[in-house]
Image (spheres, rainbow, N blue to C red):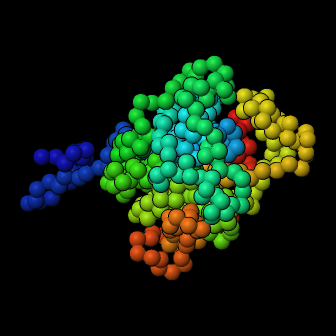
Amino acid sequence: MKPPNEKYAPASLNRPDSGRTKKKVLIMPAAKNFRIILVALTLLLLAAPSVTLAKSKVILDTDMVVLYDDGVALMMLANHPDIDLLGVTIVSGNTWVPDGAAYALGQLELLNRPDVPVAMGVRWPLRPSRYENIRLERKMFGYSSDYIGCFAKTPPASYLDAYRAEFGGTPTIKPVDAPAVNFLIDTIKANPHQVTVLAIGPCTNLAIAVRISPEIIPLIKSVVYMGGAFDVPGNTTPAAEFNFWFDPEAAKICLRAPFPDQLIVPLDVCEKYHFNKDIFDRITAPDTPIARMFKKKYAPRFDADPEYTRLVWDTIAAAAVIDPTLITARQTRYVDVNSDYGLDYGRSLSYKIQGPAGTQKARILFEINEKNFWNLMTSLLTK
């Protein structure tokens, strides 16, 4: 049998050799075969970038507000071409769950992203009667800010009421039927080792998800938190940052879960960078729906005080997910949260050497490339 793609040489090339069998002389494959090989190699090379540039899959777990800072984080993720925003799960914190769901729906409508599912999550922190006892707790444990998020408000009757109050009318999209905890579990299982959970609110949804289905813990690619204060004071009590303070038990459950990777974006980095009039002017230069929303919310502030600034917390966490090269200083430590109901309730804890039993290692973000951060954010908000 002839080997495949081999041809005999012309008869004139087969020289008789007395007493020996004529030798078979092989020639190179025909030019047609070369062309086939070259086409195949070209197709492989063209396919390679689509593998290396696959979109990053992200679930945004948030106590949503309008614009800064959760809303801007949503806009950045939804507008980035390399992010596959699998869904937005809503938790109470800055706002009650119905409020947060309404604000997420309204801003997704603004972005023309009705394809992004919104799932309503856990309304109350894990500690029983926390809402009812919050005034007494504050008096006993002290505070560094009057801000207590949704604890200062009465929960709305429904997300529709909250939507009408903020945007008017009725939303064109609605939350999915699945609760946020189930959405997290099902989506992570459907995309094993691919999903980054960006938790920019209290950790209640994620904590319950890992308690119900601990098998998702090794299936998560990464968890990125906006929360905590390690080497700086808290912003809600002298001890605690707001997100970890709102539900310390949930934060402790999550930080102690052996996720493959954890990145924490704490006050240590968030309090270094401020939104100001220069950034406002860059965002509002084009006439876009986002620009008009920014003008409605912030133009009166800058008209009254051109030196007005504000922190941007969650947008830094979103930027770190979108472009990890923005990170210029970080440390890996064992981390924990104090859940003892006392003066240090909600305090972030970290250990540069082995921490207490059950603690896990996490990367803690301390500095970013500020210029590149603002450039990334403004580019995504001016699309």
Rendered image quadrant of residue 226? bottom right
- Residue 305: x %, y % from top left: 91, 45
Q: Is residue 20 left or right of residue 298?
A: left
- Residue 7: x %, y % from top left: 24, 44
Q: From this viewpoint, which residue is outermost toward the top? A: 169
Rendered image quadrant of residue 254? bottom left
Q: Is residue 224 visible?
A: no
- Residue 265: x %, y % from top left: 61, 59
Q: Is residue 173 visible?
A: yes
Please name whichever residue, 129 or 53, is drawn nearer the observer in this view of the structure. Answer: 129
Residue 14 vertical position relative to residue 100 in the rendered view, above or below: below
Residue at 74% in and 32% down: 293
Residue at 50% in and 46% down: 124
Please name whichever residue, 125 or 35, is drawn nearer the observer in this view of the structure. Answer: 125
Residue at 41% in and 43% down: 181
Rendered image quadrant of residue 102? top right
Q: Is residue 200 left or right of residue 298?
A: left
- Residue 62: x %, y % from top left: 56, 45
Please name whichever residue, 87 or 235, is drawn nearer the observer in this view of the structure. Answer: 235
